[in-house]
Image (tube, grey):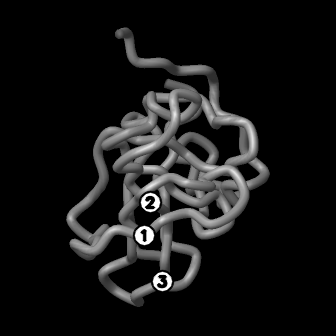
Amino acid sequence: PEECAVFHCRGCWTVLGDSLQLCGQEPPGLSVLVCFKVTSDVTWEDSLLVGLEGALLGCAYYLLFCRSCGSAVGFILYSSGSELAHLRDLFCFFKDSIMCYFLKNQTIIEASKVNFPAVTLKK
C-alpha cells in the first residue's frame, strides 16, 4: 500500500508498530492510532488506571510504555461506556508520542499531522 508507515517512539525512535496493524478510526476527543498488534518493545503494567477527565472519563485502561526509554506511548482500554466499547483490548497510541516513517518516500512525519485511510474491523 502507498501509505505504509512504521510507528516510532518519539523519545528514542524504537519501533512500536506499523500502519498495516491499524484497525479503527480515531474516536472524537482522542488523538490516537488504533492498532490490533504492536512490537515486543511496547509494554504495560498490570495495574489499571481510571480516567478522571476528558474522553477517557470513567474508563479503566492500562498505560502503554516504550520498553527502551520508558515513555508513555498509549493505552489499552479495559472498560468504557458504549461510545468507546469498540476500542477495548486494542492498542491505542497517543499521536503526540509517535513519529511515522513512510516507507515509499522515506519521510518522517509527526503522527499528529497524519491522516491514515479509513480502516475498520468487521463486527
Residue 23 lies, with reference to residue 69, above or below; the image says above
Q: Residue furthest right?
A: 113
Q: Residue furthest top?
A: 123
Q: CA distance from mark 1 to mark 3?
A: 16 Å
Measuring 34% from the left and 68% from the top, which residue is drawn there?
48
Measuring 60% from the left and 69% from the top, which residue is drawn there?
97
Measuring 74% from the left and 55% from the top, which residue is drawn there?
112
Residue situated in front as seen by the camera: 52 or 12: 52
Q: Which residue is mark 2?
A: 75
Residue situated in front as seen by the camera: 93 or 103: 93
> Is disc 2 surrounded by few (<14), some (14 to 19) or many (20+) residues within 10 Å?
many
* Label 1 vs label 2, nearer the camera: 1
Residue 71's label in the rendered image is 3
* Label 1 vs label 3, nearer the camera: 1
Q: Residue furthest bottom?
A: 69
Position of residue 67 in the picture relative to residue 109 (left or right) = left
Residue 121 lies, with reference to residue 23, above or below; the image says above
Measuring 48% from the left and 57% from the top, which residue is drawn there?
7
User: Which quarter of the picture shows residue 117?
Assistant: top right
Residue situated in front as seen by the camera: 85 or 109: 85
Q: Which residue is mark 1?
A: 49
Q: Position of residue 61 (x, y in %)?
A: 41, 59
Q: Amino acid at mark 3?
A: Ser
Residue situated in front as seen by the camera: 62 or 10: 62
Q: Amino acid at mark 2?
A: Phe
* Label 3 vs label 2, nearer the camera: 2
Q: Earlier in the sequence, mark 1 or mark 2?
A: 1
Q: Secondary structure at mark 1?
A: strand
Q: Position of residue 60 (x, y in %)?
A: 42, 57
Q: Secondary structure at mark 2?
A: strand
Residue 76 lies, with reference to residue 116, above or below; the image says below
Q: Secondary structure at mark 3?
A: loop
